Image (cartoon, helix red, strand yellow):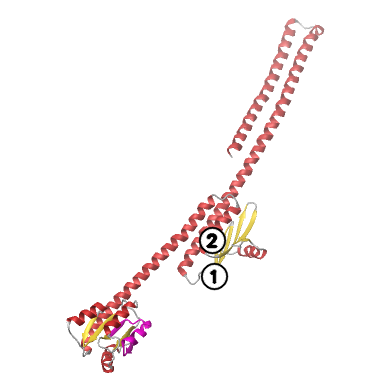
Amino acid sequence: MSDRAYKVFIVDDDPSSRLVSSFCFQRPEFELVQLDSGEACLAALDQAPDIVLLDIEMPGLDGIATCRAVRAAGLLTTQVIFVSVRNDLETRLRAYDAGGNDYIVKPVLPDALEPKVVVARQVLERQRSLEERVEQASSVAFSAMSSAAELGAVLHFLQASFASHSVDGLNAALADALGHYGVEYLLALRGSEGTFCFSGQGEATQLETSILEHVCMMDRIFQFHDRMVINYPLVTLLVRGLPIQDEARMGRLRDNLALLAEGADTRLRALSNQMMLSRQARGIGEAAMRLSGALEVIEQEQGRVRLNALCVMDSFIEELERSFVHLGLSERQEALLSEMARKAAAQVGGVLSQGRSSADQLHEVGRSLRHLHAEA
């Protein structure tokens, strides 16, 4: 049951009737106002009465006209209990048509009025309870819609961050998301090419940069008054102007801003990895080019060495065979020495061919490196 007192108007031009009726409202849960005319009642409507005990037969604005004016003023839940000396059906119908809730015949006795006041209070309690539930439901619905909209900004940022291939692009996506929350901010993004500092107005000033350098040493999430710092290895976000009086929104903001900072940190890591892979790819390409050049030089040198070696062996064999006539060898000995020399020449040729095979293998390594560079 609500603790708020019930505002009660007793509207009657007869002071004695007002006095008798007031006996039912001499309790703390009632706040009583006595008025002597319909005009006085309408003038006091800014007090928003909960119950109006309204006499029908009054000079000037009677009770029926007064009730219509009360309803026209927007007080649709006010419980109007008509009081009249008449007990006929026509008067009751007129009271009903005017928007009355109950009817009692004069003289008003406490035993007759009390049950009607109890009914009026029960109706008001149900209305108050319903209003509270509606307010709670509206609050929950608004909170849910706000939460969905705020989370939508995070999801939109994550999508935009995937399409960002630079620190400036990532800052633009973050600025768009942070603008949705209506907070001022300072931002430090630590990329592979250095640290870049921004604010809601663009590039950070020297003072703003120095502030970011100090707060990056604080805890992961640190709040002081209406300011909050969120730190990740590659991101520092300082926001101010937080709605510290709204605990529910503050909780959502803390979570969503942390998600934004974490998403930015993850994207910066991915960008750093991409740049590292690009450098590695360039290194592979340059290594492949150097290897190809070196192989060409080696092949040319090996060709000259092989040719010179073969020429030397041929000259040696010819010189050996010419010297046989001076050595006094038998034909069998001469044939044996010639055979040994030719076998040695063949072995030298085999060794040189092995060098050719090694060069072919190095060529294959070079082609693999070029293929890796092309895929990168």
Write down the residue under mark 1: 226
Q: Name the secondary structure under disc 1.
A: loop
Identify the magenta region: 31-53
Quarter-of-image position of residue 288: top right
Relative height, residue 334 to residue 4 (above, below)? above
Relative height, residue 111 to residue 312 (above, below)? below
Mark 1 touches mark 2? (CB < 8 Å): no
Whether residue 117 is visible? no
Q: How many marks?
A: 2
28 vs 104, left or right, is right
24 vs 165, left or right, is left
228 vs 108, left or right, is right
Which of labels 1 and 2 is toward the front? 2
| Residue furthest to the top | 331
Residue at 49% x, 55% y is: 156
Frontmost residue, 19 versus 63: 63
| Residue furthest to the front | 60
Local crowd size for mark 1, using a 10 Å CA cut-off: few (<14), some (14–19), many (≥20): few
User: Is 38 contained in the magenta span?
Assistant: yes
Q: CA distance from mark 1 to mark 2?
A: 16 Å
Quarter-of-image position of residue 316: top right
Q: Position of residue 159 (x, y in %)?
A: 50, 52
Q: Position of residue 336 (x, y in %)?
A: 72, 10
Frontmost residue, 233 versus 341: 233
Write down the residue under mark 2: 178
| Residue furthest to the right | 326
Q: Name the secondary structure under disc 2.
A: helix
Local crowd size for mark 2, using a 10 Å CA cut-off: few (<14), some (14–19), many (≥20): many
Frontmost residue, 134 versus 374: 134
* Residue type beneath disc 2: Leu
User: Is 164 contained in the magenta span?
Assistant: no
